[in-house]
């Protein structure tokens, strides 16, 4: 079932493009330590070098004798050698250059490296929250759609109420109360405010499936509820569940970036949202540092677009009317 | 339903700070050194600290206070009452957000109709691609980009604020400055929110165009314009209006963050300041205001549906 679904996804041009973009960012995030020229918060390079006379003598001896010779070791143990820490600071707010392809920020951190490492946080928060929301809403939808009755009344009522309470302000208010700053609170906040819409969509799908003949037959044959739900109904919901997962992940990535931009995330963590936060608080705009605030937003937009493209394809697959004539 | 949702929003306001782990109120108090006794009082009142009253009674007082318009005293703008602080910010937000919502709804819907009606054309498929790309931009980021290009580079529009401080309030040049300051935030909100209306409308319209009655209308040789607007678009817009509720939440949220980027002195920017200053009474009032505004807009959308959809109208009779 899932394999068929994936096969159709890859054969559709739009979703293939979406999968490629998403794949690109996932690879970049996974390979960040290999691809990034610097550590995300590296602001200087430190080398310890001998200086003055000592440096010259050591050089000469090293040339004359093999490196592990007795003489060199005796020399080193008997001579006081002066060493110096040579610290090279990275340039601050530097324009893109060969050393820093996307320039640096106010602390001299390399923006490209920050983007690559930031992709790890932003993508994992987005996808984890997407999964979290999908699980909550699928559970609620199956409970309310399949069981019906009072359970359905209560769940639908709460869903409808939460649906009209604007999400972002609620998120901001909750985040302002939470004294702990970090990634986990953000996932929880986004998850707890993001479930109503997908719940409603999934519930109506459960309702239509519940009254289809094959489900009725299965029930009439005396199949137990778990079998009917998980073997008859759920497999037919895969495409819509996937669609909800991708839209939830997309709004989660946007929501995370927004909360972090406002300063409600952990500003010490490097993610796309916090890069924008630091750019804004350090006046990147007014010093013309485009290399600092343009790339993170573009990354967010591209990942978002990849989710939208995949969802377009899912829509087209499940609704033939939307297909090209 | 409307009143109940309002009630839920009110209750969220009351219970959230009391349910939070780590007790934000005490954490806030611990951080404040030089604190005026009156300020302390306002925080205590907002959180119900040190009161011996049972929770139910506190809740009752809170509801009674809110309905009589007593929202407490702002902590960051002490000793201004929250209601007074809100009165300054609300008109800006209502003006900006109200206008933008109407403009983007109309434009988005029109483009959606076009994209469905002429869907074979390059322009139509381009607009679908363009808007789904734009829709995944973070609102605030697009705002930053606009500020960078139009205000910093080209110097066409001011960088922030809502009006020029030099002009006298109410004069012609003042109104002009209001327009100039509002242009970029408005553009940001319209561009990002138009996509949602446009894509919904396009999908509805495509579904409607596949209905039998459209085929019949075509076969009868009715004028195409008539079919497009009266037969297809009029029916396709219904789900758009019904879906107004959910989309409006997104638009308002985006508008808030846009205000923050442009330092536009509306409710969103005030929320930003309140969050940074940990001004909980003000934050609660802003949340309540936004929730109420969205609920009222929804109520209006429901009434619009009554006029547009004969099925609902007749069912209601």
Image (tube, coloured by chain):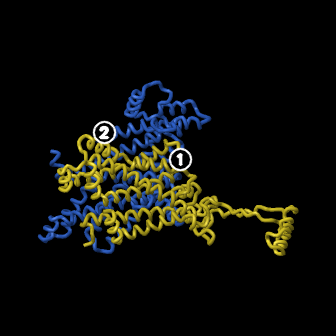
Chain colours: A yellow, B blue
Quadrant into which the C terminus of chain A falls: bottom left
Respond whether the residues carrying marks 1 and 2 are from the same subunit.
Answer: no
Q: Position of residue A62 (x, y in %)?
A: 81, 72
Q: Whole-Å distance between the Cαs marked 1 and 2? A: 34 Å
B20 above or below A211?
A: above
Q: Is residue A161 above or below residue B108?
A: above
Which quadrant does the N terminus of chain A fall into?
bottom left
Q: Could you tell me which chain the residue with mark 2 belongs to?
A: B
Q: Please state which of residues A50 and B285 is positioned toward the viewer in this rendering.
A: A50
Q: Nearer the viewer, residue B11 or A40?
A: A40
Residue B196, horizontal then vertical, whole percent = 35, 59
Q: Is residue A33 left or right of residue B95?
A: right
Residue at (52, 38) in percent of width and height: B22
Q: Which residue is mark 2?
A: B3
Q: Which mark is residue A122?
A: none
* Left or right, B5 with reference to A69: left
* SS under mark 1: loop
Q: For the residue carrying disc 2, how many other residues have a C-alpha within 10 Å: few (<14), some (14-19), or many (20+)?
A: few
Q: Residue at x 28, y 46 (%)?
A: A144
Q: Residues within 10 Å of mark 1 (few under 14, many from 20)?
A: some
Which residue position is annotated with label 1? A181
- Element type where label 2 sits in the image: helix
Residue drawn where x is 82% and y is 75% of the image: A63
Residue A209 pos. (x, y %): 23, 54
Residue A49 or A70: which is nearer the viewer?
A70
Pair 1/2: label in front: 1
Q: Are marks 1 and 2 in contact (CB under 8 Å)?
A: no
Tag 1, which chain? A
Residue plotted at (49% across, 58% down): A122
């Amino acid at each position: 079932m899932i394999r068929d679904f994936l096969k159709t996804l890859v054969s559709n041009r739009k979703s293939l493009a979406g999968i490629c973009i998403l794949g690109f960012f996932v690879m970049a995030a996974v390979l960040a330590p290999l691809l990034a020229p610097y550590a995300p918060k590296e602001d200087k390079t430190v080398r310890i070098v001998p200086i003055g006379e000592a440096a010259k003598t050591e050089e000469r001896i090293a040339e004359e004798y093999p490196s592990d010779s007795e003489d060199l070791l005796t020399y080193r143990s008997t001579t006081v050698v002066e060493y110096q820490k040579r610290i090279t600071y990275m340039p601050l707010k530097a324009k893109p250059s060969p050393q820093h392809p996307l320039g640096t920020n106010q602390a001299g951190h390399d923006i490209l490296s920050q983007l690559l490492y930031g992709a790890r946080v932003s993508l994992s928060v987005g996808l984890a929250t997407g999964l979290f929301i999908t699980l909550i809403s699928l559970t609620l939808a199956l409970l309310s759609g399949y069981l019906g009755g009072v359970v359905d009344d209560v769940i639908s009522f709460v869903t409808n109420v939460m649906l009209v309470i604007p999400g972002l302000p609620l998120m901001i208010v909750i985040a302002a109360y939470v004294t702990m700053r970090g990634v986990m609170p953000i996932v929880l906040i986004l998850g707890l405010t993001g479930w109503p819409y997908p719940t409603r969509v999934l519930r109506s799908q459960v309702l239509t499936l519940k009254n289809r003949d094959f489900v009725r037959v299965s029930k009439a044959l005396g199949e137990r509820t778990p079998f009917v739900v998980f073997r008859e109904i759920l497999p037919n919901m895969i495409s819509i569940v996937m669609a909800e997962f991708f839209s939830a992940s997309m709004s989660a990535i946007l929501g995370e970036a927004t909360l972090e931009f406002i300063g409600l995330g952990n500003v010490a963590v490097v993610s796309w949202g916090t890069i924008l936060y630091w750019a804004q608080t350090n006046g990147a705009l007014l010093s013309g540092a485009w290399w600092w605030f343009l790339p993170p937003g573009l990354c967010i937009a591209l990942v978002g677009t990849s989710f939208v493209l995949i969802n377009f394809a899912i829509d087209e697959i499940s609704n033939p009317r939307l297909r090209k004539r | 339903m409307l009143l109940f949702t309002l009630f839920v929003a009110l209750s969220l306001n009351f219970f959230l700070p009391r349910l939070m782990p780590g007790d934000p109120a005490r954490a806030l108090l611990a951080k404040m050194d030089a604190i005026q006794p009156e300020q302390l009082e306002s925080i205590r009142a907002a959180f119900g600290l040190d009161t011996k009253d049972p929770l139910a009674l506190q809740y009752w007082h809170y509801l009674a206070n809110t309905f009589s318009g007593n929202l407490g005293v702002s902590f960051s703008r002490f000793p201004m009452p929250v209601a007074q602080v809100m009165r300054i910010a609300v008109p800006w937000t209502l003006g900006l957000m109200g206008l933008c919502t109407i403009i983007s709804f109309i434009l988005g819907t029109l483009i959606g109709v076009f994209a469905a009606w002429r869907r074979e054309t390059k322009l139509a498929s381009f607009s679908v691609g363009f808007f789904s790309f734009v829709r995944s931009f973070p609102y605030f980021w697009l705002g930053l980009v606009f500020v960078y290009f139009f205000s910093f580079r080209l110097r066409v529009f001011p960088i922030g604020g809502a009006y020029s401080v030099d002009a006298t309030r109410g004069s012609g040049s003042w109104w002009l400055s209001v327009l100039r300051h509002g242009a970029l935030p408005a553009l940001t909100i319209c561009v990002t929110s138009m996509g949602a209306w446009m894509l919904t409308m396009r999908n509805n319209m495509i579904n409607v165009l596949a209905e039998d009655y459209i085929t019949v209308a075509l076969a009868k040789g009715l004028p195409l314009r008539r079919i497009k607007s009266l037969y297809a678009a009029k029916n396709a817009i219904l789900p758009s209006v019904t879906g107004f509720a959910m989309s409006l939440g997104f638009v308002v949220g985006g508008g808030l963050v846009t205000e923050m980027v442009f330092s536009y002195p509306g409710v969103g920017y005030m929320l930003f300041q309140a969050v940074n200053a940990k001004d909980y009474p003000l934050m609660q009032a802003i949340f309540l205001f936004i929730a109420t505004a969205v609920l009222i807009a929804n109520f209006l959308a429901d009434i619009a549906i009554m006029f547009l959809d004969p099925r609902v109208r007749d069912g209601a009779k």
